[in-house]
C-alpha cells in the first residue's frame, strides 16, 4: 500500500511517516512546505518531498506537486489546513486535525472554515489528535463511524532517560523547564507568577524558558514580571532550541511545565517527550477523574496556586520525582509510542482502502 501525507503539524507527520515505513507492506511519503529545521531527525530523505517555505507561493508549488501525484497512491492523508487540497481528485483521503484548526477555524464562516468543513465531510475518514476534538468535529457534520482519535506519536526510543550535554542548573539545586512559546491559550503566565512566589522563598530553584520569536511582547512581559519580583537572576532565558536538541534539555531539567489552561485541559508533545525522558510534568488536568490524562501521573497546573504547590512538592521530594518519571514513561509508552500509533493508523488506512473499492 502506497500512502502520501500532505503537510505536517509539530513533527507529527514526519513521525507517522517513519512509523509507517517501518511496517511491512507500506510505502509512505510526505509532501510538506516547511523550513529545514522542521525536518524530523532520522527521517529517510527519499520518503520526504520538502518544498522550501519562502512565501505564500510555496503552497501553490506544493499544490502543483500534489496534483501531479493524483492516482499514484492508494491513500492520501491531509494534515490540518492542507486537508482541503485533497478534494482535487485525491481519493480516498484521510483528514487529520490537531487543535486550533477545529477550535478556531473549522466552525467559522471564512473561506478556510468552509473548506475545512467540506474536506471533513468528503473524507473517507477523519482523525483528531486530542480527545476533546471529537465532539466538536461531530457537531460539524462528521459521523462517529468515520471518526477516530489517533494519539500524537512519541519516539520512545529517542526520548529516553540518560546523560545530557546541557547544563540548565547553573549552580541551582532544582530547575524547571518551560519549552513552549508563551501564547495566550497556554496561559504560561500562571507558571511565571507561581515561580516568582516560590523563588522569593527558595533561592535554590531556577526557571529555564525559551524566548520564541513569535511571542516577543509576551516574552518582555514575563521578563518584566521576573525583574519586578526580584528573581530574574534565578531564571534563564534561552534561544529557540532545534528539535534534535530537545532531548538533552528535558534530561537536564528536574521538572517540565507546559499548558496551564484549566478551561481546555490538554497535553503537548513537548510534555510527552519530557515524560518519555522520565521527567516529572506539571500541566492542567481535566476535572473528570476517568479522563486518560489523569492517569499520566502529572501534577496539577490548573491555576497559579496549584502550580506553586506542585513546584514545592517536587523541590522537597526527590523520590517523588523519580516515581513520577517512571509512571510518566510507562504511560507514554502505553498510549503514544510511535510504533503503536503507526499500527493504529495502518489499520485505518486498510479499512479505508477496502471500503473505497
Image: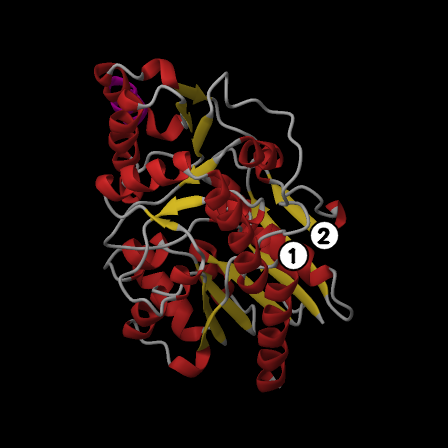
Q: Is residue 132 above or below residue 305?
A: below
For the residues labelled 1 and 2, say whether their Cβ atoms are less than 8 Å apart. yes
User: Magenta stretch: dominant SS?
Assistant: helix
Distance from the alpha carbon under mark 1 to that under mark 2: 8 Å
Quadrant in which the C terminus appears:
bottom right
Residue 250 pos. (x, y %): 54, 36
Q: Is residue 289 left or right of residue 28?
A: left
Residue at 57 percent across and 79 percent down: it is 352
Q: Secondary structure at mark 2?
A: helix
Res 32 seen here: yes
Which dot marks residue 17? 1
Q: Is residue 250 left or right of residue 259?
A: right
Look at the image and give the residue range highlighted in magenta.
Answer: 218-224
Magenta highlight on residue 222: yes
**Closest to the observer, 121 or 163:** 163
**Closest to the observer, 233 or 310:** 310
Q: Is residue 146 above or below residue 12?
A: below
Q: Secondary structure at mark 1?
A: helix
Quadrant in which the N terminus appears:
bottom right
Residue 316 pos. (x, y %): 40, 35
**Closest to the observer, 321 or 336:** 321
Residue at 47 percent across and 63 percent down: it is 96
Q: Is residue 74 above or below residue 130?
A: below
Magenta highlight on residue 270: no
Give the colouring mode of the picture. secondary structure
Query: Circle 2 is placed at which residue position?
Result: 47
Which dot marks residue 36? none
Residue at 58 percent across and 44 percent down: it is 277
Earlier sequence position, callout 1 versus callout 2: 1
Q: Is residue 204 above or below residue 277?
A: above
Residue 51 pos. (x, y %): 60, 41
Image quadrant of residue 110? bottom left
Amino acid at each position: 500500500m502506497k500512502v502520501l501525507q500532505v503537510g505536517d503539524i509539530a513533527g507529527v507527520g514526519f513521525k507517522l511517516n517513519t512509523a509507517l515505513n517501518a511496517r511491512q507492506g507500506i510505502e509512505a511519503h510526505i509532501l510538506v512546505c516547511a523550513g529545514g529545521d522542521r525536518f524530523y531527525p532520522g527521517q529517510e530523505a527519499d520518503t520526504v518531498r520538502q518544498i522550501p517555505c519562502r512565501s505564500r507561493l510555496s503552497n501553490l508549488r506544493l499544490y502543483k506537486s500534489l496534483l501531479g501525484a493524483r492516482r499514484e497512491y492508494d491513500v492520501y492523508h491531509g494534515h490540518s489546513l492542507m486537508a482541503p487540497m485533497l478534494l482535487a481528485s485525491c481519493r480516498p483521503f484521510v483528514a487529520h486535525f490537531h487543535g486550533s484548526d477545529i477550535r478556531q477555524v473549522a466552525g467559522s464562516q471564512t473561506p478556510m472554515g468552509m473548506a475545512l468543513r467540506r474536506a471533513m465531510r468528503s473524507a473517507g475518514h477523519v482523525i483528531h489528535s486530542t480527545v476533546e476534538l471529537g465532539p466538536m468535529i461531530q457537531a460539524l457534520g462528521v459521523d462517529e463511524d468515520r471518526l477516530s482519535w489517533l494519539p500524537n506519536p512519541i519516539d520512545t526510543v529517542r526520548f529516553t532517560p540518560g546523560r545530557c550535554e546541557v547544563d540548565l542548573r547553573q549552580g541551582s539545586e532544582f530547575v524547571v523547564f518551560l519549552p513552549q512559546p508563551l501564547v495566550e491559550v497556554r496561559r504560561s503566565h500562571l507558571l511565571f507568577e507561581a515561580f516568582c512566589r516560590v523563588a522569593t522563598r527558595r533561592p535554590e530553584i531556577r526557571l529555564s524558558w525559551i524566548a520564541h520569536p513569535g511571542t516577543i511582547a509576551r516574552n518582555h512581559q514575563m521578563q518584566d514580571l521576573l525583574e519586578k519580583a526580584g528573581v530574574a537572576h534565578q531564571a534563564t532565558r534561552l534561544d529557540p532550541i532545534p528539535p534534535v536538541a530537545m532531548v538533552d534539555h528535558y534530561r537536564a531539567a528536574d521538572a517540565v511545565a507546559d499548558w496551564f489552561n484549566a478551561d481546555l485541559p490538554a497535553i503537548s508533545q513537548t510534555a510527552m517527550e519530557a515524560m518519555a525522558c522520565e521527567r516529572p510534568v506539571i500541566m492542567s488536568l481535566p476535572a473528570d477523574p476517568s479522563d486518560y490524562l489523569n492517569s499520566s501521573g502529572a501534577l496539577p497546573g490548573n491555576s497559579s496556586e496549584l502550580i506553586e504547590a506542585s513546584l514545592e512538592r517536587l523541590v522537597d521530594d526527590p523520590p517523588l520525582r523519580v516515581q513520577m518519571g517512571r509512571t510518566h514513561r510507562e504511560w507514554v509508552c502505553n498510549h503514544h509510542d510511535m510504533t503503536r500509533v503507526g499500527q493504529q493508523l495502518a489499520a485505518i488506512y486498510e479499512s479505508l482502502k477496502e471500503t473505497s473499492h
